[in-house]
Each structure stands twice: as C-alpha cells, then as structure tokens.
Amino acid sequence: MVATEAVQAAKDYILELFQDEKIARVGLEELEFRATDEMWEVTIGFERLWHSDSPARLGTVLLAPLAKPRRTYKTVCVRDDGTIVSLKHRDVSVPA
C-alpha cells in the first residue's frame, strides 16, 4: 500500500463512521508509516458544526449557520494490507 491509498482508506473510514454527524472539511493532517509493524498512522481532521464555541446549546442549534466549528482530529491506524486497526482521538491543544 502506498501513502495515497492509506490516506484514502482512512478518509473513507472516517466518512462512513461519522456519516450521521454530517461532518465537513475532511482532510489529511499527518501521515506516518511505521515500518516495525507495517502500519500507517493517518491523522484526519474534520469539522462538526455542533461542536461550536457557543455556551448555550439552544443558541447553538438556533444559530447553527453562524456557529464557528472547531476542528476534530482522529488518528486512523491502517495496516499495509488496507485493514483498519484502530481509531483514536488526537488532542491538539492550542494555547489561549
């Protein structure tokens, strides 16, 4: 498997897994091949509109079109044969 195939497998997995959440702007963030176990670590970022900075949930729903979504990051481990092994949340903290 080459890098582009691993990335596509990870994106397809994310899109399928989160399809009910209507995620947007799905894109590659990081990619690493671990030769020791022939595993690709693919970090995919995407946006969830409901994951806004608004403190009031009702306000978030009513103002959804105006909400500023935050990016969510997930690391998908893909074996060199294309098998998805795991999905983990990737915490990317940005200093305030």
Image: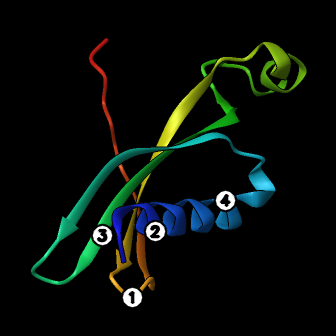
Mark sitting earlier along the chain (1/4) = 4
Q: Secondary structure at mark 3?
A: strand
Rendered location of residue 59, percent (x, y): 82, 18
Which residue is tagged 4? 15
- The answer to whether the residues at label 2 and label 4 have Cβ atoms under 8 Å apart is no
The residue at 23%/59% (across/down) is 32
The residue at 59%/68% (across/down) is 13
How does the figure colour the protein chain or chains?
Answer: rainbow
Total numbered labels: 4
The residue at 9%/81% (across/down) is 36
Three-letter code, disc 1: Asp
Three-letter code, disc 3: Trp
Three-letter code, disc 2: Glu
Please tell me whether mark 2 or mark 4 is closer to you in this view: 2
Q: Secondary structure at mark 2?
A: helix
Quadrant for the C terminus, please: top left
